[in-house]
Image: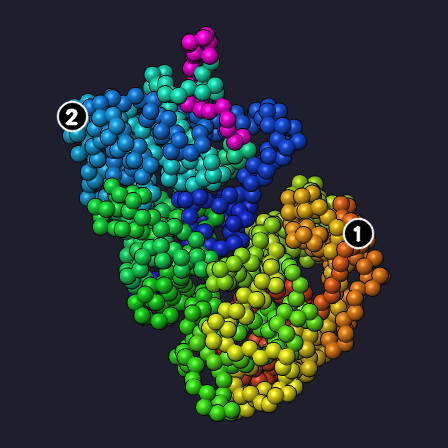
Amino acid sequence: MSAPVTAVPPAPAGFDLAAERARTPGCATGHHFNAAGAALLASDTVEAVIAQLRAESLHGGYEAAKLAADDLAAVYTRTAGLLGVEADEIALVESATAGWQRIVSALRLRPGDRVLAARSSYVSSALHLLAAERDTGVRVEVLPNGPDGATDLEALERTLRTGPAALVTAAHVPTSSGLVEPAAGIGALTAAHGVPFLLDATQSLGQLPVDMPALGCDLLIGTGRKFLRGPRGTGLLAVRRPLLERLAPQAPDVRGARWTAERSWELAPDARRFELWEAAHALRLGLGSALADLHALGPATVFGRLSALAARLRERLGAVPGVRLTDPPAAGGAIVTFVVEGLDASEVQRRLALRRVYLIAVPADHGRWDLEPRGLAKVVRASVHVYTDDGDLDALVEAVAEIAADAHGHGTDRGAQAAGPGAEAATASASRPPAHLPRTRPARTSANARRDAVVVGLGVHGGAALRQLAERGLDVLGIERFTAGHDRGSSHGATRMIRRAYPHPDWDGLVDTAYRAWAELEEAAGTRLVEVTGGLYAAPGERPDPLRGPGCRTVDREKAARIFPGLRLPEGFTAVHDPAAGIIDARATLRAQLALAERAGATVADRTRVTGWRPDGDGVVVRTADGEVRARRLVLCAGPWMPDLVPSLTPHLTVTRIVNAYFAADPAGPLGPGGLGSFSVDLPEGLLYGFPAADGRGLKAGLDSGPAWDPEADGPAATDAELALLTRAVQRVLPGAGPVTESLTCLYTMTPDRRFLVGEVPGVPQALLASACSGHGFKFGPAIGAALADLVCELPRPDLDFLSPARLVPGGAR
């Protein structure tokens, strides 16, 4: 049976899911289920870190620390409030493991001392204890679990009665499952026997209530990077009085001790005795920002939402054939673990990452006391957070269902069923053609043999379609009238922009698909194609159709100047900040797609002009100067030459000539990657767009407008007037730019509504097209290629209805 399709449980009253996602830039880059490893940072947390680093660069590290003294002190106060202790019982450290090692060392364990450790103990903690057992004679006793998989409290009590113990330790939530240990029960027993209780709250802080007095724990360690949503490199250690006064670090530091005489010193009276002088203040301020966010949401609200989300995910995954949940009965909170029968967990993780679903595989040697007795070599771990939404759960369950079906030879239907009605056909069909199309290329028995598909035009969309069709086992021919990578059309040049900011929600699904498709293309090509720089897209404040999008937020000109110091917006302008925006390596993309297509068996014919085509029964005939080619399906990606091939579209398409130029700029200065990302600004001269000086050629900029142009005409160099206009626009908002060093032109094919045409040629279902990308289509290249391959394989793509050519020529003939 398939996993039932139901929505995520309603958010708690007062919880704004859209707001949480909007201030979490990582939501724009995929479906993230690794909060138990390193949760997505909120934009305010990132800005807190950057602001302190910038202050250090301007004022010096010591001076910046003094300026931030109140904010740094607030980190202790917020941490103490979360744990129910006093601020002077808190030490800030570099990681949970650093805190563990300092506090256990301060206990000065001796030969024969008994340490009672729960099976939930983390690998680093267990290794430290085992090393102490080997090197100093400490006795480490691993506590048994009860039938529910948690520490057996009755067994713990019997063990405590057998003799004195120096320490009891447990992980509140282990790294290897969603188990929640009975911490309060352990604390009550240790208190009754006068034994210190060290709780590893690394996986519970930020997702479960952690009140030290209520739990009865004397010592606690935690990290900032997991459910607290703080930066990596932050951790905390809490030591409650009166135990605090009895513990001294084995290696005092100037932060925690004062050198009083030649051979004597005094420890700090508080938990800061466990700190080191050298600390990343920027990261600590980021942790403080994350703690403030948690306080604003309310820990109880977060706990309720995360528990409900994980319970729903556990239910849905448990209903997928071939998937086995591995959480013990005492599981709860935000973590869900499972295996796909017959597949290594790391392979499941890899296949999910190709779909931009991110989680982790936990091997037994990270939790051997837990996993090994349960016969588990490795598990897949998914963890939710407040930014997780219905689409994320659907994406994970759909992908796992498809992977499980692949592993057991069940086909693709289960994956689509598990995902629900909103599932994307592209994911469900990415690797296999339907049964009625051949999986292997047929033998070519004559010149009139019919191919499965012909792709005309091998720019970014045609190349992507050619690759997708070849990798699905189709016999496909790609025809290009010039040479690959030519400069006569719309796909040439060094760079293109990728962003999530769009004026209408219709684009959101395709944008998300595109980001996943780029990640998959990079994986397949073995090369990096997208560099995330962040982006700012600015316009006058009264603009009627402002940009927006998942993970994006509006900023004023002052905040924009802090994000991109190289960009200076005019008065009255606002900008949309898209942290997931970036720069695409256009040349490498074209090369990679064609190389992958040919590797999969596609045939490429360049310097071959298509002179016409016609329907032929259930297929098509394509005419070239070298003769005719027959195919089941035709895919037209001819860019500016589309009006020649589909005359019915001619009244609706306008080909324009666009000028771009490079301006002298220091890549180490404010117009380099350190002070600028991708950008656009709506100016009186036109929409100015561009990229930082990152490729050794300077700042690249262009204006998104130009004269109508005949693609058959020669493309002359940019005129002095065109470059003067572009220079004025650049100088208006990029004052550090130097003179023009080189220029280039390209052609845009525009529709009146600036939306693409993707779908059947009006009136000819055997022919498909992708065209009129209106200057913003390159970023969708791999996704549109996959969509065209789906349509060739007769797989529906209702998500592309808003781009259908039928909106311009309803039912029209070609």
- Res 784 quadrant in image: bottom right
Instruction: Look at the image and say whether residue 93 sits in the magenta stretch.
Output: no
Residue 331 in percent (x, y) is at: 30, 45
Is 554 left, or right, of 416 in this rendering?
right
**Quadrant the C terminus occupies:** bottom right
Which residue lies under the disc numbered 1?
Answer: 739
Q: Nearer the viewer, residue 86 or 255?
A: 255
Residue occupying image coordinates x 20% and y 23%: 112
Which residue lies under the disc numbered 2?
Answer: 161
- 408 is higher (above) or lower (below) than 62: below
Is 777 left, or right, of 436 in this rendering?
right
Residue occupying image coordinates x 67% and y 43%: 668
Total number of numbered labels? 2
Residue 22 in percent (x, y) is at: 55, 49
Residues under numbered marks 2 and 1 in contact, where contact means CB atoms less than 8 Å apart: no
Q: Nearer the viewer, mark 2 or mark 1?
A: 1
Q: Nearer the viewer, residue 314 or 453?
A: 453
Instruction: Look at the image and say whether residue 264 sits in the magenta stretch.
Output: yes
Instruction: Give the magenta-colored segment's residue range.
Output: 259-281
Labels 2 and 1: the sequence-earlier one: 2
- Res 680 quadrant in image: bottom right
Disc number placed over residue 414 in the picture, else none: none
Residue 376 in percent (x, y) is at: 25, 50
Circle 1: element type: loop
Q: Is residue 749 something that shows in the picture?
A: no
Residue 799 in percent (x, y) is at: 52, 68
